[in-house]
Amino acid sequence: SAVISQKPSRDICQRGTSLTIQCQVDSQVTMMFWYRQQPGQSLTLIATANQGSEATYESGFVIDKFPISRPNLTFSTLTVSNMSPEDSSIYLCSVLRDRGAGEDGYTFGSGTRLTVV
Amino acid sequence: AQTVTQSQPEMSVQEAETVTLSCTYDTSESDYYLFWYKQPPSRQMILVIRQEAYKQQNATENRFSVNFQKAAKSFSLKISDSQLGDAAMYFCAYRSLWEGGSQGNLIFGKGTKLSVKP
């Protein structure tokens, strides 16, 4: 399975600023996803990062707040913009080797713990 | 839209005993995947077990097994001979196989926090 390097692992940020989280995969993957996990809660899909085109956002998440880039098949970034304390969460990158690899193709990054003060 | 429900926010088990975590889901699709993931305090999501909906046989991985009841839309996880290292959050997840139904992402339940008592 793919190996993911997600950076930073944690950060404490001032409200009103932005943070960019990086997700680097050691092999080419078809699908890349960004999830948010609020304290003590489940994982909620923010968006699917599409290579060479705009990300596909889930209801409740917008591009202005969570811009995503995916310049190639091994790398993606998620930016949390104009942060407020409500953005304090764990953000996880997940990849799927290819769309047909549903059984064991999912890999998760170790997450970024963001605290906004 | 598909939903996944885990009705047990917290569970506790004595070391070496058996515990069952519940999961139900709602879908109109006939083919899909179901997963159980473990998330220890390190935050790393670890795949515990997976089940293809078209397979009637329940999946088993060492001490972990599932009871998959497709008609009832139930997918429970049984952990036998519980160990201290099993303590974690456990998430049940669903994946649609319908091209128009999703981006290929997982849909997660709210999770069950499992404690193991020595």
Image: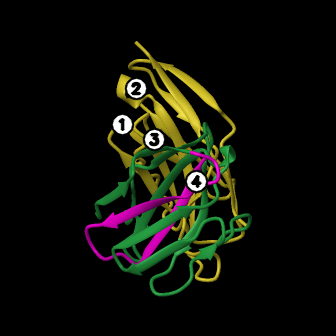
> Rounded to the nearest whole Å, what is the CA distance between mark 2 and mark 4?
30 Å
Q: Are marks 4 and 1 on the same chain?
A: no
| Closer to viewer: mark 2 or mark 3 | 3
On screen, residue A94 above or below B114: below
Residue A29 drawn in magenta? yes
Return the chain for callout 1: B
Tag 4 secondary structure: strand
Q: Amino acid at mark 3?
A: Gln
- Which shade of the palette goes to chain B? yellow
Question: What residue is shown with label 2?
Answer: B82
Q: Residues within 10 Å of mark 4 (few under 14, many from 20)?
A: many
Q: Are marks 3 and 1 on the same chain?
A: yes
Tag 1 secondary structure: loop
Q: Amino acid at mark 1?
A: Arg
Question: What residue is shown with label 4?
Answer: A36
Question: What residue is shown with label 3?
Answer: B39
Q: Residue at x 64, y 82 (%)?
A: B100
| Closer to viewer: mark 4 or mark 1 | 4
Q: Position of residue B10 (x, y in %)?
A: 61, 28
Identify the mark at residue B34; answer none if there is no mark.
Answer: none
Q: Residue at x 64, y 72 (%)?
A: A63
Q: Are marks 2 and 4 on the same chain?
A: no
Q: Residue furthest left?
A: A26
- Which shade of the palette goes to chain A? green
Q: Amino acid at mark 4?
A: Arg
Query: Magenta region: which residues?
Result: A14-37
